[in-house]
Image: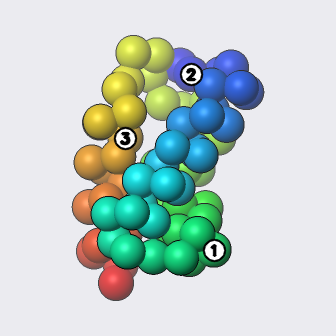
Amino acid sequence: MITDKLEIERLLTRLTTYIANKLHLSTMAAVGAVCMSKVANELAGGKIPEGTTFEDLSERLLKEVTMAQ
């Protein structure tokens, strides 16, 4: 599981930027979308397996966010 706080923080930052760019959202809207996501909660809770790639996480997050809109 990914438990390194610095790595989690980096991934959350990258995911926020990714969502902002991909969906043309403001940074604040992207932060809200990421914070409310299951992906971010799993990541912050140490439930994402070690070796999971950014691409895996961003794909899951994008599906989750676009389904909620």
N-term mark: 2 or 3: 2
User: What residue is shown at x 34% (from left), y 71% (from top)?
Assistant: 23
Question: In front: 33, or 28?
Answer: 28
Q: Which corner quadrant holds the C terminus? A: bottom left
Where does label 3 land, which residue? 57
Residue 62 in which image quadrant: bottom left
Q: Is residue 42 visible?
A: no
Please name which of the two marks, 2 or 1, marks the residue nearer to the observer: 1
Element at label 2: loop
Name the residue at the bottom extreme: 69
Residue, disc 2: 2
* 35 vs 25: above or below: above
The local secondary structure at tag 3 comes to helix
User: Residue 43's spot in the image, x, y percent?
Assistant: 56, 38
Q: Quadrant of residue 67?
A: bottom left
Residue to which mark 1 is pinned: 28
Task: Give amino acid for label 1.
Answer: Met
Distance from Cα at disc 2 to Cα at disc 3: 12 Å
Disc nearest the viewer among 1 and 3 = 1
Residue 16 visible, this angle: yes
Q: What element carries label 1?
A: helix
Given the current orientation, which residue lies at the most extreme right position?
5
